[in-house]
Amino acid sequence: MHAAEIRRLLEDTYRAALEQTRPALLTARHLPGTPPDAVLAVGKAAPGMLSAALDAYPGVPALAIVPPGLTLAARSGLKVVVGGHPVPDEGSVQAGQAALRLAAGLGADRHLLVLISGGGSALMSAPWGVTLAQKQALTEALLASGADIGELNTVRKHLSQVKGGRLAAATSARVTSLLLSDVVGDDPATIASGPTVPDASTFAQALGILDRYSLDAPEARRHLERGAAGEVDETPKARRWEKRTSHQVIGSGRLMTRSASAFLTSRGVRAESLGELTGEAREVAAAVAAKIRQLRSAGGGPQVLLWGGETTVTLGQERGLGGRNQEFALALLLALGEKGAHGLLAGSDGQDGNSGAAGAFISPGSLERARRSGLDAARSLARHDSAPFFAALGDQFVTGPSGTNLNDFAAVWLGEEKDG
């Protein structure tokens, strides 16, 4: 295949995987047969999930909590609140309060359908023990320190009136939750910080995370210490309300990768999956580069190497523009060296960090083109400034918000490239 054909194949694979895992499609397959009394949808996939529910249950009252840039068509009984992401804002607080009011207003003979997707942790916020500004600062500090999503959510759950099962505990209604997973392992208690799922984490663990990353946050520490001492209630762990709640993960990054593999097979291209990858982006990139060299040495003809997951980026003093996918892509380029590879690394939500892009393409000639343009790939990586690097090469992958969030997508072509 020619270089342009390879790039087109990789992009087509990404788009086909998202098409097969559309939130509305997945939600419609799992809706309860009897209309609920109210619907709450929160997260980056809320518009698609909610549209399927309201098509099935016209006229049912609904609350949608969405990020900026995503809209829903006006419907009778629908209220929309826009929250902040990845750091909560005043809209997030309004969203958290609206969700708690909706839940608390339903009696024991009522049924609440909750549609949850990634991004919900920031979009729906009800700070507890700290102010919004203090919670914002702590969230930013945890993200910059390289804390993974599990660690971040453990802290957030214990500084919230809505996370860690507290939303379900706030109502006596029956609660059914359908979840689209953006976390490795698809733990329902981690997706959007598990507002309707019992929480196994503790105040003491949240304190330990602050210690691990040497974060001060005195107000948060005081609240967490009170919790660890038993002075305030832990997140719900008892099974007293589990009999009236149920939850189901209906889509995930693994499903997206399987869909990508099926698309490639339909095109006559062999696919191999590395599964879900986690860890520091540049370190994981080095391991993937070693795997690529191994597969090339073994031969076997053209194939595409796929993986998903969620890596982290630990920021130092220099903080440029980019995201974990573009950082991974740049680190992979450097690890592969001059031979390089054709690849696409992108977030399924269409947003990679603070870059405005979904991710980036790489190619065997990327490093040489960068040198000719006066770009220093190693320096860009050291400064966590991957977005300007790929933008200068014309290799950023820009899609805008996709309306879903199933974690990250990566595909690398292993095969010969035709000249011309």
Image (cartoon, helix red, strand yellow):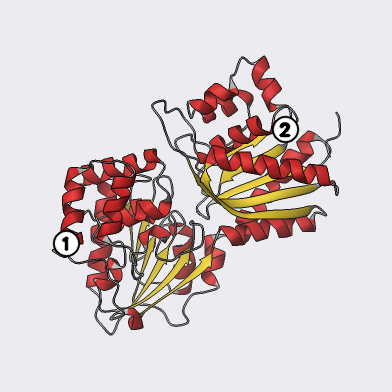
- Residue at 39% x, 49% y is 67
| Relative horizontal placement of residue 85, taking residue 4 as reference (left or right) | left
| Quarter-of-image position of residue 225 | bottom left
| Relative horizontal placement of residue 20, taking residue 238 as reference (left or right) | right
Measuring from the top left, give residue 130's x and y in whole percent: 18, 49
- Residue at 32% x, 44% y is 139
> What residue did someone put label 2 on?
340
> What residue did someone put label 1 on?
229
- Residue at 59% x, 18% y is 375
Label 1 secondary element: loop
- Residue at 53% x, 30% y is 386
Measuring from the top left, give residue 404's x and y in whole percent: 51, 54
Relative to 377, does residue 112 appear above or below in the rendering?
Answer: below
Q: Amino acid at mark 1?
A: Ala
Say which mark, if any, is on residue 362. none
Residue 204 seen by the camera: yes
Between the C-alphas of marks 1 and 2, the distance is 54 Å
Measuring from the top left, give residue 182's x and y in whole percent: 49, 56
Relative to 300, does residue 370 appear above or below in the rendering?
Answer: above
Q: Residue furthest left?
A: 231
Relative to 178, does residue 340 appear above or below in the rendering?
Answer: above
Can you say which quadrant of the picture contains the N terminus?
top right
Measuring from the top left, give residue 410's x and y in whole percent: 63, 46
Can you say which quadrant of the picture contains the C terminus?
top right
Label 2 secondary element: loop
Residue 21 seen by the camera: no
**Could you say which is closer to the camera, residue 202 or residue 135?**
202
Q: Amino acid at mark 2?
A: Gly
| Quarter-of-image position of residue 262 | bottom right
| Relative horizontal placement of residue 331, taking residue 164 as reference (left or right) | right
